[in-house]
Amino acid sequence: MSFSRRTDWNTETSDLARAHRARLDAGLPLLDLTASNPTRCGFEYPSDLLAPLLDSAALDYDPNPKGSGQAREAICDYYTGHSADIDPENILLTTSTSEAYSYLFKLLCDPGDEIIVPVPGYPLFDYLADAEVVRLVTTPLIYDHGWQLDPDSIERSITSRTRAIVLVHPNNPTGHFTSREQARMLFDLCKLHDLALIVDEVFLDYALATDCVVSDALTFLARQPTVPTFVVSGISKILGLPQMKVAWIAAAGVGVEQAMVRLEVLADTFLSMNAPMQRALPVWLGQREQIQSQIRRRVRGNLDVLDQLLCAQPTPWVTRLEAEAGWYAVLRIPALCPDEATARELLERGVWVHPGYFFGMPTSGWLVVSLLTPDDTFAAGVRMVLDFVAERETAQQI
């Protein structure tokens, strides 16, 4: 059997993944600092969370490619809380943000066209681009007392095949918001080169500090976009419900009316949304503070613990890069060996972390840990990481 070149991925399990599986299979203790599934992190969900799924109205099949009006109005209400006034006609429901990206890449790109994505960022983008026969062009984020885009690198990357710039706001895993000035720079670049802007805002509700700059934390829908801007989000992060499969595209800016017509045809071709989830969405969004308050308390508390442990190091071998939002922290460690080797040695000691290259960072000197991790596990795991790095560095000094 022959297969398409777009699916010619390396599907072999990495040595690190095999070692992780072997430790789990052996039943050995492991402190997991990579937790990303909120349903398994000890949060308390409303006892009646599933009740809206029993609405008998969902037995009536009333397909709408954009999603039900009731669900889209609820999403508009969500954005009203973020100072954005959105027309429900400019919202289209999908089953996941991945599906939303798939629709947008189909909408904007022919095979071989290019999408610009700053890194560090989601590893998933590579697969999404391959699946749509789109070329992913990466540009580096710059770290200088905080993360920021590199306008010159972005502009140099634009070619006649470029169709859009993809932005994650706040970024994952760096946790930085895109400032008002950098957003304006992106609007200007996109307008100059006739590009669309795709903005992933799944972590928008999870600021790590209560005093972050309000204008920087705004949704792009509230920034008066002057170019076609497509915001992607969903309840995987907003409600901590990745298993419920509800996401959306919200469009704003010049020319989005025609874009929505075409997106509606794409969605009508698949009709992937189901009725029970759409019926439940208004209720669930209305309850979001019940889970979000727990998650914010967890990630902020773990960040405080991390900073305390870092400050207590006799020698500051490990440092934390600044972050403003999200569920992750990026750690800088001495670049003595590849991060995969560091992660492997930590695994053998009983703690599991992400090597930075998973997110497009250089192959040495970076670890990423999840702030979503239950607090006892997090503190114990971070101590093990710091002890390991200190021991390794001390040995190097001898």
Image (tube, rainbow, N blue to C red):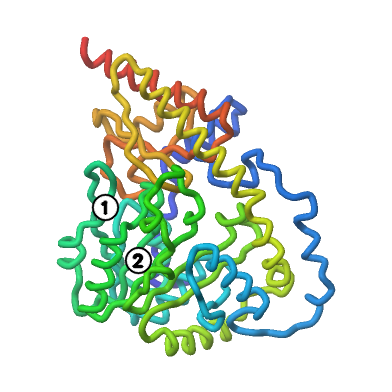
Residue at x 80% of width, y 60% of height: 51
Q: In the picture, which quadrant includes the C terminus? A: top left
- Label whose residue precedes the other's in the sequence (2 or 1): 1
Residue at x 27% of width, y 13% of height: 395
Mark 2 or 1: in front is 1
Q: Is residue 173 left or right of residue 371?
A: left
Instruction: Tell me if mark 1 has few (under 14), some (14-19) or many (20+) residues whose alpha carbon lies within 10 angstroms of its own.
Output: some
Name the residue that disc number 1 marks.
148
**Vertical arrangement, residue 70 with respect to residue 234, above or below:** below
On the image, the x and y values in percent for residue 9 come to 40, 60
Residue at x 17% of width, y 67% of height: 155
Q: Which mark is residue 33?
A: none
Residue 55, picture quadrant? bottom right
Q: Is residue 43 left or right of residue 366?
A: right
- In the image, 174 versus 390, the foreground residue is 174
Q: Is residue 397 left or right of residue 346?
A: left
Instruction: Tell me if mark 2 has few (under 14), some (14-19) or many (20+) residues whose alpha carbon lies within 10 angstroms of its own.
Output: many
**Vertical arrangement, residue 284 with respect to residue 327, above or below:** below
Q: Amino acid at mark 1?
A: Gln
Residue 235, picture quadrant? bottom right
Direction top: furthest residue: 398
- In the image, 148 versus 359, the foreground residue is 148
On the image, the x and y values in percent for residue 116 come to 28, 66
SS at mark 1 in the image: strand
Name the residue that disc number 2 marks.
166
Q: Amino acid at mark 2?
A: Val
